[in-house]
Image (cartoon, grey):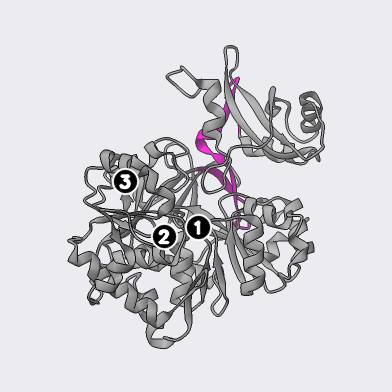
């Protein structure tokens, strides 16, 4: 089975139903199939070869989705470039992918000269924006209008369908090779767990370079859901769109949910239409769940855990979001068809409830990292994806993600998992955001260092926070130093950017461990 089935299936079953809504444009399933086939024809006429990459640097739009599936239809490989990266990072990924075509919208035209200079593999540039295309670029609408519709060229289920780059929080970003077979194995899991619910109108607000930008539209279109897109997430714009379009299903990261429910104008709009809110990328706090329950009591919450290399791994259903049952701290239980192990540094299983590295196995895993065979072998050793996340399984099969393995603080020979300290800090009412990192220390090797963003109007000292934590965690786990910021830096997928927080403390050192 191929990912293009999400275009072909509903073009037959429901050709007149809206598939995509973007601003004032609505595209039916029948129109979508025709435009994708024409887009593929246009790409082939301009020389796109089998397996060649098409880099896309653009805010979300219906045209981006069409180009994604048109590239796959033509047996090419779309590569959605992280729009939040700096120019050097974007140039690195495009050059690393060896893309022969690059598509941009008007928001990134100023970067185009530098990208072309630094990415010699790029031979042609497609303009995704509105209006006339700049000189030397192919207008997307002309590509579709002039393209002769072609039959679906997909022929190998094990071929790469998408190339998605990791967030780069632990080093240079790596290209994750996602196959047709792997993605189509993930879709039934998502549907079975009702992470995408057939028949519900869906809004997609994450950037399309996110792994969710592959899986959610794929699953939604496959079952005939109408997908509404916005260029980028702006809290009030999102609230208005949900109310106006009567959106029933959302997929967000917790920070996005918080920005909406805490917006001063939230209560002015009728969001009673929302039935399901899926989220991932980071845990959710009990306090935020409480506010969601109060403001959107009809909405069911679901957490998905995994990573670009293997999503989904676990699902935490709505029932486990009830406060006081202890499940909210977990990432849920393994999804159907997914196996999870907790292993030590030698790849051996640890005892039940002990902390180790989370390893995942299932038919949905990546094929490997693009042009990185050694890192592929290490990540997929023995057929298991070694996630780099530390965690444990309780006796009921719930997975608890404790930390990134590399985020562990080793102080005086004792291992301190930062998430445990962060959970303690977060219980203080003055703390809005927090992150715990390791900083170098001549005596102890590393010290536990806390970076804090305070709630509006709150005041607290490091000593007070230390006393607060002393009631919750062992003494050796207490933060020994504190840093206060207005807000914590985030990665493009909404996680706290600990690389940026660590950098000032480890600058000039060859190693990032003590």
Q: Which residues are magenta?
A: 389-416
Circle 1 SS class: strand
Relative to the observer, which residue lies in front, 473 or 181? 181
Relative to the observer, which residue lies in front, 392 or 448? 448
Q: Is residue 154 visible?
A: no
Residue 455 image point, x, y percent: 77, 40
Nearer mark to the viewer, of 1 and 3: 3
Q: Quadrant of residue 158?
A: bottom left
Mark 1 or mark 2: name the one nearer the start of the chain: 1
Crowding at dot 1, Cα within 10 Å, few <14 / some 14-19 / many 20+, comes out as: many
Tag 1 near tag 3, CB within 8 Å: no
Residue 259 drawn in magenta: no
Return the mark for residue 94: 3
Relative to the observer, which residue lies in front, 459 or 390? 459
Mark 3 or mark 2: name the one nearer the start of the chain: 3
What residue is disc 1 on?
A: 313
| Residue located at (39% from left, 57% from top) | 365
- The outermost residue toward the top is 442
| Residue located at (82% from left, 32% from top) | 459
Q: CA distance from mark 1 to mark 3?
A: 28 Å
């Amino acid at each position: 089975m191929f990912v293009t089935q999400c275009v072909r299936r509903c073009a037959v079953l429901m050709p007149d139903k809206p598939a995509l809504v973007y601003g004032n444009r609505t595209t039916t399933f029948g129109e979508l199939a025709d435009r994708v086939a024409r887009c593929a024809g246009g790409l082939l006429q301009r020389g796109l070869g089998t397996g060649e990459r098409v880099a896309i640097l653009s805010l979300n739009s219906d045209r981006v989705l069409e180009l994604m599936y048109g590239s796959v239809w033509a047996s090419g490989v779309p590569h959605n470039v992280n729009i939040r990266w700096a120019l050097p990072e974007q140039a690195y990924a495009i050059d690393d992918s060896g893309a022969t075509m690059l598509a941009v919208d008007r928001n990134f035209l100023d970067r185009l000269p530098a990208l072309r200079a630094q990415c010699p593999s790029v031979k042609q540039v497609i303009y995704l924006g509105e209006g006339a295309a700049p000189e030397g670029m192919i207008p997307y609408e002309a590509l579709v209008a002039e393209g002769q519709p072609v039959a679906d060229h997909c022929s190998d289920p094990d071929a790469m369908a998408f190339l998605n780059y990791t967030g780069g929080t632990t080093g240079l970003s790596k290209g994750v090779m996602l196959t047709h077979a792997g993605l189509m194995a993930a879709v039934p899991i998502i549907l079975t767990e009702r992470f995408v619910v057939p028949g519900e109108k869906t809004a997609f607000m994450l950037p399309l370079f996110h792994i969710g930008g592959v899986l959610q539209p794929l699953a939604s279109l496959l079952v005939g859901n109408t997908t509404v897109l916005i260029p980028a997430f702006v809290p009030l714009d999102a609230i208005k769109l949900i109310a106006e379009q009567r959106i029933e299903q959302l997929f967000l990261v917790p920070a996005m949910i918080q920005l909406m429910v805490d917006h001063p104008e939230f209560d002015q709009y009728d969001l009673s239409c929302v039935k399901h809110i899926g989220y991932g990328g980071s845990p959710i706090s009990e306090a935020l769940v409480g506010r969601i329950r109060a403001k959107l009591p009809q909405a069911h919450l679901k957490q998905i855990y995994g990573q670009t290399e293997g999503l989904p791994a676990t699902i935490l259903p709505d029932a486990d979001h009830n406060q006081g049952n202890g499940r909210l701290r977990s990432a849920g239980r393994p999804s159907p068809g997914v196996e999870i192990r907790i292993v030590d540094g030698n790849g051996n299983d640890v005892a039940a409830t002990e902390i180790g590295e989370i390893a995942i196995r299932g038919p949905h895993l990546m094929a490997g990292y693009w042009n990185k065979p050694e890192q592929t072998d290490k990540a997929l050793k023995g057929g298991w994806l070694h996630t780099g996340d530390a965690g444990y399984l309780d006796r009921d099969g719930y997975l608890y993600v404790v930390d990134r393995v590399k985020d562990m603080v080793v102080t005086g020979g004792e291992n301190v998992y930062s998430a445990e300290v962060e959970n303690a800090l977060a219980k203080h009412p003055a703390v809005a955001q927090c992150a715990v990192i390791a900083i170098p220390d001549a005596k102890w090797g590393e010290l536990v260092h806390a970076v804090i963003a305070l709630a509006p109007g709150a005041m607290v000292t490091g000593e007070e926070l230390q006393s607060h934590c002393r009631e919750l965690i062992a003494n050796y786990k207490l933060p020994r130093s504190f840093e206060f910021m207005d807000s914590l830096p985030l990665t493009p997928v909404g996680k706290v950017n600990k690389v940026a927080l660590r950098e000032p403390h480890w600058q000039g050192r060859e190693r990032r461990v003590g």
